[in-house]
């Protein structure tokens, strides 16, 4: 299984969201088996936070392969399904970070008032580090609600023929073409013609 260092390398920085995503993918793969080489595993993510980067690295479900599906609900819920049966697990984050002490609370207060002194920045960094460590070391049962599910699978990635947009001349995959006055148009051009976009 991919390590946390690889996840941090891909994402570019280390943060609590990434730690959550890492633990989510680990927990899911423990139940589902090995990471996805091709498209046999599908991940449905309900937010687009840092966590999703960890999920791509660890689970092998990516936008490019078409086996990462975004449902932008702003929820910390991740569902992993197997093809072709649609059986899998739903991982929902339930962890609540421990309450902050007085010192940290006043530190955040100073930060929000624009204080970027070395003292405040150091305290925030240390706090973040403690939070990341806590997430990485927590018991799976304390972090997540995990249950088995069986769901309808999203369509498999397909290759479609391209059609040229009648307005901008750029190529568009066929199912994404919109017809307006018998002219095939791309989405941005339809919006431009409606005057929504410049
Ligand atoms: Zn991040
Ligand atoms: Zn166009």
Image (tube, grey):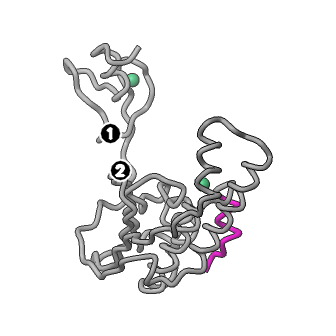
Q: Which residues are magenta?
A: 1-10
Q: What whole-number distance in Å separates the C-alpha atoms at marks 1 and 2?
A: 25 Å
The image position of residue 193, as x and y in percent, is: 30, 15
Q: Secondary structure at mark 2?
A: loop
Mark number, residue 149: none
Of residue 54 and residue 74, the one placed in the foreground of this image is 74
- First reached walking from the N terminus: tag 1 or tag 2: 2
Q: Left or right: where does residue 189 sit relative to residue 111?
A: left
Instruction: Read off the residue under disc 2.
Output: 72
Instruction: Read off the residue under disc 1.
Output: 174
Ligand 2 in which quarter: top left
Which of the 4 quarters of the picture holds residue 110? top right
Residue 55 colored in magenta in the image: no
The image position of residue 119, as x and y in percent, is: 78, 50
Of residue 49 and residue 119, the one placed in the foreground of this image is 119
Secondary structure, magenta segment, majority class: helix
């Amino acid at each position: 299984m991919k390590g946390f260092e690889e996840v941090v390398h891909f994402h570019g920085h280390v943060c609590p969201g990434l730690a959550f995503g890492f633990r989510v993918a680990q927990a899911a793969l423990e139940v589902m088996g090995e990471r996805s080489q091709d498209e046999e595993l599908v991940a449905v993510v309900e937010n687009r936070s840092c966590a999703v980067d960890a999920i791509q690295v660890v689970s092998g479900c990516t936008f490019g392969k078409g086996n990462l599906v975004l449902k932008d609900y702003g929820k910390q819920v991740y569902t992993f399904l197997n093809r072709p049966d649609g059986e899998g697990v739903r991982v929902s984050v339930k962890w609540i970070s421990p309450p902050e002490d007085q010192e940290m609370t006043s530190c955040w207060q100073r930060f929000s008032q624009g204080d970027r002194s070395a003292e405040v920045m150091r305290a925030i960094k240390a706090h973040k580090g403690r939070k990341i460590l806590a997430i990485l070391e927590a018991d799976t049962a304390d972090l997540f609600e995990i249950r088995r599910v069986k769901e309808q699978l999203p369509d498999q990635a397909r290759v479609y023929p391209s059609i040229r947009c009648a307005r901008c001349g750029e190529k568009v995959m066929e199912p994404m073409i919109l017809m307006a006055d018998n002219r095939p148009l791309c989405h941005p051009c339809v919006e431009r013609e409606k005057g929504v976009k410049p």
